[in-house]
Every structure is written in structure tokens, then in C-alpha cells.
Amino acid sequence: MLVLEKYSFGVGDRFAQQAKAQLQAFQRLAAEGVAVVPVWNKSNREHTFIGSEPPSVRAAAQAAVTAAGWTGSWHVDADHIRLNTVDRFLGSSDFFTIDVADSIAQPAAPGAAAAFADRHPELIGATAVGQTTRAQIEQIAGKYLLAVADAGRIYRHIAAQKGAAGFIAEVSMDETDAPQTPAELLVILAALADEGVQLQTIAPKFTGRFNKGVDYVGDLAQFEREFNDDLAVIAQAIQRYGLPANLKLSVHSGSDKFSLYPIIRRALQRTGAGIHVKTAGTTWLEEIIGLAEAGGAGLELAREIYGEALDHVDELCGPYASVIDIHRERLPSLGVVAGWSGAQFANALRHVPNHPEFNASFRQLLHVAFKLAAKKGQRYLGLVRDNEAVVARNVVANLYDRHLRPLFLG
């Protein structure tokens, strides 16, 4: 079986330009004694928006690994795939995030919930998450069994092409309205075991807001309780259901969740558990920051993209409405931004929350505006390559200083 290592970190690279810089951050962490495996991820939606193909992700990662002499493991994630999108990723990915959130709460087959409860009397009574009743277990099963069945179909489809031992499976249920409780997670894992899904990571939806590119919004104490309960559920599910021993939690939209990193780090230190954290989009923002700092044509293009984003706010934000909170009154006008220096543009965009010039709404709008850069084609890519040094410096600093080090070293 292709085994996912204990600590792994998903990095998005929407324009396939920054794999080398991203890898430098993992090398710096390794030099400090912490082995974290990079997982390059890109979703079907992002490929569609940009006009790229899945093999480009592996090609960029392989080139960076070769150039850097990286001898550790690395993976390529087909992010948020469904049965109708998975085939284009089969040749280039070894990690598959199976997204079944759309099937949650869809009716299960008649009698399926009762049959599940019959198969799993151990879920009734005292469990890792307290006392449960048969009625509760049936209610939870009825909510999730169709989603789990979908995960099983997708998993078996991948296995038929790559072999059951030839890939890493993650099951994602985070892109839905309501968070899963620890009791629900236990039922989900039991049902996935019934389906024969040998998942190595599970991505539940946690309580609170996991908005793209900004910090967590929610009750930190509640998150800590739920996170630790989820770790206990996974440990129990491994023992009871024969799921892979390395099964671990996956935190989606994990970039920039600075207030959560100490909580996660304490839990991992206490339990010895592993973690997968998935990020996306922040590398593209570091490219724009680098172009702004470079000045000249780079700053001009950064301003231009922002102006176009202002003109297309609804169109850009629609696909991400559930994971962004933009206050339009806080978006500076293009006239104001036109008067900014490169440093001012970078300070407004770079995620340093206590910086007086940081603007979370500005950051979130540009976060979802990557398709505007894609339309610039070689003009954008050429400027990113021409200013590789300043862009790479920002990419490395963002990933290492603000993400990897706080999460794994403190």
C-alpha cells in the first residue's frame, strides 16, 4: 500500500511556477528536524478556470524535486474529485481527495440506516464520544450513508485503474453547510470500513468559519474540544474497523489559520497523531505580492488585476461564497490603489493580521481573482518568471514562517 507519511501538507500552485520555492520551505523545516511531506494539490475547478491539465502539476513538482535533490516523499493530489471528474487525474495523481459533500443528507436507501445499526451494535451505548442511542445512530446513518456509498464507488473506480495499493485516498466532507460532530465522524468511519474504503485521511467540516486565505473565525475552545474528540474517534475506528493505522485528520482551507496552529500542535504532541493540512490559493497571492514589490510593470499588472476584480466581484465570489467574507465597503477604490507604492500594495495583501495596512477584504477578493491573471497568459507568467527572486522569497517566507514552523515547531 502506498502509505501517506505522518505529517503532510498540501500546497496549491495554481500557475505551476512555485514548486521549487515551496519545496525550499519543506527543506528548511527538515533541516530543523521535522519531516513534513509536500502534497501538491489542484482541483478540477481550478484546472478549468486556468485552462491547465492535471499532468502539469506532477511535471512542475517533479522538476522542483529533481532540481532541489529532494530525497523525501512527495505526492500529487487530485483535489475534490467526483466520479465524473476523476478520470483525467488517474495518470498523474497518487493522492485522491474524494469529495462527497454534495451527497450528505440525501436520502439513503429504505432500510439502510436500520441495517447499519444492526451491523454495528458497538456504536450504541458508551463510545469514544459518550453515550449514544440506537435512534441517534440511525439518524446519523440516514444522513451520511449515501455519501459514503458514493465514496465507495469512486474509491473502487480508482482502485480498478491504479490498484488498491497504488494510491492514497482521502474522503472529504468539509464543503457542506453543517459541521460533523465526533459521533457523526465515528459513524462515517464505520460506514466507510463497511464499503471497503481504505482511506488514509478524512476531512470533516469543523465548527467555525474556514474562509479562504484568512484566519479562523469561531470559538477556539470549542474547536479544541472537537479536534481532540475527533482524534479519539479516529484512534477507536482504527482499532475496531481495520482502517489503515496511519489514518489521520485532514484540515481543509488550512492556510492562514494562525489561531488554530497552537491548538493542533498541542494535540499532536499529546497524542502522537499525524495530520494533513491542505492549503490552496495563497501561493498565487505571494506571486502578486512579489510583483507589487518588484514595482514597474509588476506593480502595474497587480493594480490592473485588482481593478478588474472590483468590476467582477459577484462573478468571482460566487463559486466561493461559502468560504469568503468580503466587506465591500472595505475594498479600496482603484483610484486609491493606483496611488499605492509596491510596499503599500504588498502590506494590504500580505497576511500579517496586526499590520496596520493589512486589509482582509482586499486579500480575499484577490484570492478568488486568480482566473483574471490566467487570462493575462504569458504577460502574467513572464512577469512572475522575470521577478522570480522576489516572488520566491515571499513564497518561502509565507509557507515556512507563517505556516510550517508555527504548526510543527511553535
Image (tube, grey):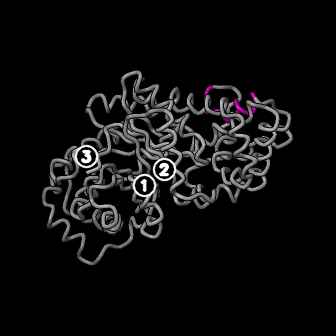
Label 3 to label 2, Cα distance in Å? 30 Å
Residue at 56% of width from left, 30% of height from top?
A: 396
Answer whether residue 344 is magenta in the image: yes
Query: In the figure, residue 34 lies in which quadrant?
Result: top left
Q: Secondary structure at mark 1?
A: loop
Q: Which residue is mark 2?
A: 58
Q: Is residue 289 above or below residue 242?
A: above
Q: Left or right? Give the position of 17 relative to 24.
A: right
Q: Which residue is mark 3?
A: 234
Q: Badge 1, how many Cα within 10 Å: few under 14, some, many 20+?
A: many
Q: Nearer the viewer, residue 145 or 99?
A: 99
What span is colored magenta in the figure? Answer: 343-354
Instruction: Identify which amino acid the numbered label 1 is placed on.
Output: Ser
Q: Left or right? Give the position of 410 relative to 326.
A: left
Q: Which residue is mark 1?
A: 93
Of mark 1 and mark 2, the one earlier in the sequence is: 2
Label 1 to label 2, Cα distance in Å? 7 Å
Residue at 38% of width from left, 51% of height from top?
A: 204
Label 3 to label 1, Cα distance in Å? 26 Å
Instruction: Identify which amino acid the numbered label 3 is placed on.
Output: Ile
Q: Residue 209 location, x and y as percent?
A: 50, 45
Q: Are marks 1 and 2 in contact (CB under 8 Å)?
A: yes
Q: Is residue 141 above or below residue 329?
A: below
Q: Residue 182 location, x and y as percent?
A: 30, 49
Q: Badge 2, how many Cα within 10 Å: few under 14, some, many 20+?
A: many
Is residue 222 visible in the rendered structure shown here?
no
Instruction: Identify which amino acid the numbered label 2 is placed on.
Output: Arg
